Amino acid sequence: LKAVLIIADGMADRPLKELDWKTPLEAARKPSLNQIAKAGICGIMDPISPGLPPGSDTATLAVLGYDALKVYSGRGAFEAIGCGVNVLRGDVAFRCNFATVGNNLVVLDRRAGRISNEDASKLAESLRKTKLEKSSNAVFIFKNTIQHRAVLVIRGPELSTDVSDSDPEKVGEKVLETKPLDESPEAALTAEILKKLMQKFHEVLMQHPVNKERVRRGLPPANIILCRGAGAVPNIKSLSQIYNIRAVCVGATPLIRGVCKTAGMKLIDVKGATGTPQTDFMAKAKATIQALKTNDFVLLHVKATDVASHDGNIRQKIELIEKIDSMLGYMLDNIDVDVTYLAVTADHTTSSVTGDHEGDPVPIAITGPYVRCDDVEKYDERACAKGGLNRIRGMDLMPILMNLIGKTKKFGA
Amino acid sequence: LKAVLIIADGMADRPLKELDWKTPLEAARKPSLNQIAKAGICGIMDPISPGLPPGSDTATLAVLGYDALKVYSGRGAFEAIGCGVNVLRGDVAFRCNFATVGNNLVVLDRRAGRISNEDASKLAESLRKTKLEKSSNAVFIFKNTIQHRAVLVIRGPELSTDVSDSDPEKVGEKVLETKPLDESPEAALTAEILKKLMQKFHEVLMQHPVNKERVRRGLPPANIILCRGAGAVPNIKSLSQIYNIRAVCVGATPLIRGVCKTAGMKLIDVKGATGTPQTDFMAKAKATIQALKTNDFVLLHVKATDVASHDGNIRQKIELIEKIDSMLGYMLDNIDVDVTYLAVTADHTTSSVTGDHEGDPVPIAITGPYVRCDDVEKYDERACAKGGLNRIRGMDLMPILMNLIGKTKKFGA
């Protein structure tokens, strides 16, 4: 017995005026999603707890069965791990942007004109030559990823994630000074290291030939690094330790890959999977079917729906839901439904009106042998609320799936 | 106001192909169960938490209102208490089997041919004369119960339940050496006491005239004691302390009786109640009605349904559900429904396919004065999922019942 969990990022929504007060899921044509709802048991799920808007990292931790409220320790480490950096326990990791500042360190462009990978790579190479002060006993790793994005990891004996961001996250505001967020010497040291490193980075970037060339070509210079989201690797058991399973992740988003890697899952690279609305859905479906052959559990993550929601692009969100539906149709046609459980959900609600993650529950449907199927016939937020699962929490999902595939241990006698 | 909680062990199931994808509850003729669902408020209940397969001990603790994940401390003590042994705090108790081993301590029969009570009693009498080493400062209690079953309690100043079983639980395997499961001196001492005691027991049994006679008659000798499930009495308040009620248990299964006794409940012996499919259901109903006269809360436990499920005997499971239904019919006819609440549930789902306890929720229905009855008309896993209780946890049930009979205290002002 095997299980596939499909997570469509931010797919759940609220009823929208533009859709005659339907949600995008309710408005979309989605025969395969409906087929799963019809054949299976449905419900609604609070990713963390009712009303709490989760991040994609905390929600994914939760649906993998972890108590996110207890174990979450910031986004940075997941992002860095998802980008292939080997983050160790005790490291403090940050998400970074190449950005453009003007006089007085006022942010002019948080993405330095969505700088090319090529330019960013050259700049990163120079930044890596920066030396931390010996007295700090720390070293750092800096890696650019896609366009303006990068990750920074500081490694040393006594660091803390309790430091503030330098990224003001708003154009027109001044770059912030990194400060300790508690009274500990670790936080003070980490803030100090970061502050000095950011100053040195700024100096290197201001002088850099790549930036001089950018200015000449009329492009915004990437003259500063902004960092945010200090995080450490959470101290959690792997899924294989907990359930004795082989688990893999099919997904392109670094943050989600980082969470899955931290949970001990293998990461599968899929050609054409991009974490954007242009991703190759069918390639992901095929990779999932392939992965099922040698694994017990596959998490298939699709980022695209969240991107459309953040942009408030309702039409695109519906189109993407329909593409996900086609992907599921292919999977239903090509997996052995007698030995495979399929669960479909979203990691959180993203409102196309507010453009933000919201605290509403998400729909969940589970099909597979011997599930107590109910009379729900459609896969959407309101139809699933009448299903046999009633209302569960994200943390409950993994025990339910693992029980169905025979991987839970009896508690008691 | 009084309350009766009827727990049918393992009665809940998954849809079965043999029953046209109905569950045994859905397939059974059960007018009284349906009447309770119709008159009452229904729901589904996770005995411990979604997806987690509970034991009958942990599930019973939970539906009595205790946080099983926190207070459970092994099966052995409940079993011993249920067999009438006075287990004290600090004691370590084990479930034991009279078994047959051959050369090299390989287990040939885990039940010594289901040895007669008479033979087992004679052997136990001799075993009780064994002396523990003085240096251990410990004493022991050994009591045979039914056929090959027995309980062992070790009493001493510094013992631990963190010791491994000697019972390999499989024929053809060697008897295991009892080992400490942590680094504590208490676990080391307990394992050492147990190991030496088992050796002495083995020596006594090998020489015993009863066994020589058994071999002569072609019966397997009960030449070893296997032990498992080290447990201590959990540190919990009694139901009378928590709710100021008089509570009793009508049930024959030692494990359940042990849990109830630990919760401070009185145990009622019912002639003909056996904890097997052949139990006298009507005698239990009558005992319950009698007990209601002088008590506030009666737990009526029926083991039979779980036995049928473990055997994968679907027909028998349905028949037993129908017998439980008749028992409930008698109760409905003979209790004063104006002052009595009836709650019917299962302690866990037992799948007739896997033969194991599973993590699916169980149905729950509560009737009685002023309950917010819903429109559920049938008592089964899927019909109850649409009820007004929605999805609750085992731990929630006792507060709900105690509130209905006016035994809860306001929290706050």
Image (cartoon, coloured by chain):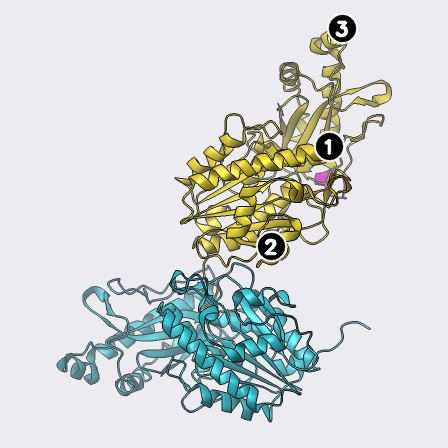
Chain colours: A yellow, B cyan
Could you tell me the amino acid type at mark 3? Arg
Name which quarter of the figure residue B216 lies in.
bottom left
Work out whether mark 3 precedes mark 1 in sequence or the reverse, and give the earlier one: 3
Tell me which secondary structure the magenta stretch mostly adopts.
loop
Question: What label sits on residue A216 in the rendered view?
Answer: 3
- CA–CA distance in space, label 3 to label 2: 58 Å
Q: Distance from label 3 to label 1 (Cα)?
A: 32 Å
User: Dot 2: what SS?
Assistant: strand
Q: Quadrant of residue B321?
A: bottom left
Q: Which residue appears at 28% of the width and 83% of the height?
A: B120
Q: Name the residue carrying label 2.
A: A43
Relative to A411, is B292 on the left or the right? right
Circles 3 and 2 on the same chain: yes
Q: Determine the residue positioned at 55% across, 29% down.
A: A84
Mark 1: give few (<14), some (14-19) or many (20+) Cα within 10 Å.
some
Which label was assigned to residue A311? 1
Q: Chain of mark 2?
A: A
Mark 3 residue element: helix
Expressed as whole percent of the image width and height from the top left, the position of residue A281 reads: 54, 32
Q: CA distance from mark 1 to mark 2?
A: 28 Å
Question: The disc labelled 1 sits on which kind of residue?
Answer: Asp
Q: Looking at the image, tell me whether mark 3 or mark 2 is earlier in sequence order.
A: 2
Hey, what amino acid is under mark 2?
Gly
Quadrant of the image for the C terminus of chain A? bottom left
Please report, as a chain letter, where disc 3 is located: A
